[in-house]
Amino acid sequence: MSKTISFVMVGTNDLDKSSKFYDVVLDNLGMKRVTVTERYIAYSHSREDGGLKFYITKPQNKENATAGNGTMVALSAETKEAVDKFHKIALENGAVDEGKPGLRSDGNYYSYIRDLDGNKIASRFLVK
């Protein structure tokens, strides 16, 4: 079976600071560091090569990282409480609120933040 998405990557201007933020924020969603290099860090639910990965990276062209206008990454959560906790932990660690946890027009439960580099990140629980 073919996957539509292999990995997601967001830029950072301070890999050390960003990794400390994501270590705490992604732990709540069950994601851990699986690869660390001097240019990027990958997070995943498992160390399996086939698993979806979330990367924070210094831009390859060595220019400053910028947040894309209209770009957003949505990370899955297992419960509404995990979405709430993602939002709370992110704000406590320097993120900016982009949308408090709650039900949205599609009937699912989301929260939205801007990370330390301005990247828009959502957490989503699929309501059945």
Image (cartoon, rainbow, N blue to C red):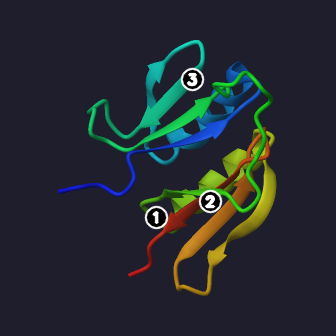
Q: Which residue is mark 1?
A: 79
What residue sits 72% from the left and 62% below the top? 70
Labels 2, 3: front one:
3
- The quadrant in which the N terminus is found is bottom left
- Residue contact between numbered discs 2 and 3, judged by CB atoms under 8 Å: no
Real-space CA distance between mark 2 and mark 3, rounded to the nearest whole angstrom: 21 Å
Q: Residue furthest front?
A: 61
Disc on the earlier residue, 1 or 2: 1
100 w.r.t. 39: above or below: below
Indicate left or right for 75 with 66 as reference.
left
Q: Position of residue 31 (x, y in %)?
A: 45, 39
31 w.r.t. 111: above or below: above
Q: Which residue is mark 2?
A: 122
- Label annotation for residue 40: 3
- Which secondary structure lies at badge 1? loop
Q: Position of residue 101 (x, y in %)?
A: 67, 69
